């Protein structure tokens, strides 16, 4: 893997990883663990909307598969290995694809480090919406997340959009 060829990917993944780990360490040492999900221990950024908390998630999104933390750790390694092995098929030489996978890889590494370092993923961004979405957000509260989670979601959505755009071009 050429460092020059994948420069954009490495820089983006590195920036995400560093920002993610710095914010998690700050949260870990400044906000009480678990009790901060509710007042008075949470940090209010915007009243009734945006809070900082400190919770641990052993599972995947929304805490699903929390009883399979070891398997999720192995799955993270497997996904990173898959990306490396299939980098040509994934077209990682393309700059826009490198952006998507830089976000994805940085996010995976950030959460993987948490699983190894503290035994769970540290989540700290707590968003409350002024409305509810039945079956999705019945109480108007999005599950707490972190920078790595955000990077994974944005990276996947961006890659999906790139793929759809490429498919549309091939059809025309």
Image (cartoon, grey):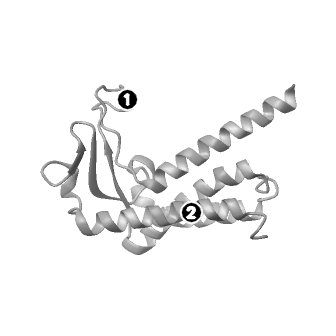
Q: Residues within 10 Å of mark 2 (few under 14, many from 20)?
A: some
Q: Is residue 31 left or right of residue 80?
A: left
Looking at this view, is 166 or 60 the one in front?
166
- The correct choice, above or below, for 159 with respect to 82 in the image is above
Q: Is residue 131 left or right of residue 21?
A: left
Residue at screen point 47% across, 70% down: 113
Q: CA distance from mark 1 to mark 2?
A: 28 Å
Image coords of residue 164 (percent x, y): 73, 34
Examine the rendering and report whether any part of residue 91 can be seen. yes
Indicate which disc residue 76 carries: 2
Q: Is residue 70 left or right of residue 58?
A: right
Q: Quadrant of residue 83?
A: bottom right
* Residue at disc 1, secondary structure: loop
* Residue at disc 2, secondary structure: helix
Indicate which disc residue 9 carries: none
Q: Total label count?
A: 2
Q: Quadrant of residue 154?
A: top right
- The correct choice, above or below, for 25 with respect to 36 in the image is below
Q: Furthest residue to the left?
A: 40
Residue at screen point 63% across, 60% down: 79
Image coords of residue 30 (percent x, y): 24, 65
**Quarter that holds the C terminus:** top right
Indicate which disc residue 135 carries: 1
Q: Residues within 10 Å of mark 1 (few under 14, many from 20)?
A: few
- The correct choice, above or below, for 149 with respect to 77 in the image is above
Image coords of residue 85 (percent x, y): 76, 64
Looking at this view, is 168 or 44 the one in front?
44
Examine the rendering and report whether any part of residue 108 can be seen. no
- Residues marked 1 and 2 touching at CB (< 8 Å): no
Quick one: label 1 or label 2, which is nearer the N terminus?
2
**Quarter that holds the N terminus:** bottom right
């Amino acid at each position: 893997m050429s460092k020059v060829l994948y420069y954009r990917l490495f820089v983006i993944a590195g920036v995400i990883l560093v920002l993610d780990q710095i914010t998690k360490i700050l949260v870990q040492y400044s906000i009480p663990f678990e009790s901060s999900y509710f007042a008075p221990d949470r940090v209010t950024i915007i009243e009734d909307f945006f809070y900082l908390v400190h919770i641990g998630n052993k599972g995947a999104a929304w805490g699903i598969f929390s009883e399979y933390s070891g398997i999720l750790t192995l799955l993270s390694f497997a996904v990173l290995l898959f990306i490396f092995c299939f980098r040509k098929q994934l077209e990682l030489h393309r700059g826009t694809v490198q952006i998507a996978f830089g976000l994805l890889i940085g996010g995976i590494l950030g959460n993987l480090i948490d699983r190894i370092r503290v035994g769970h993923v540290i989540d700290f961004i707590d968003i409350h919406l002024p409305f509810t979405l039945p079956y999705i957000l019945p109480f108007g509260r999005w599950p707490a997340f972190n920078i790595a989670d955000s990077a994974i979601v944005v990276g996947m959505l961006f890659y999906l959009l790139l793929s759809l755009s490429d498919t549309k071009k091939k059809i025309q």
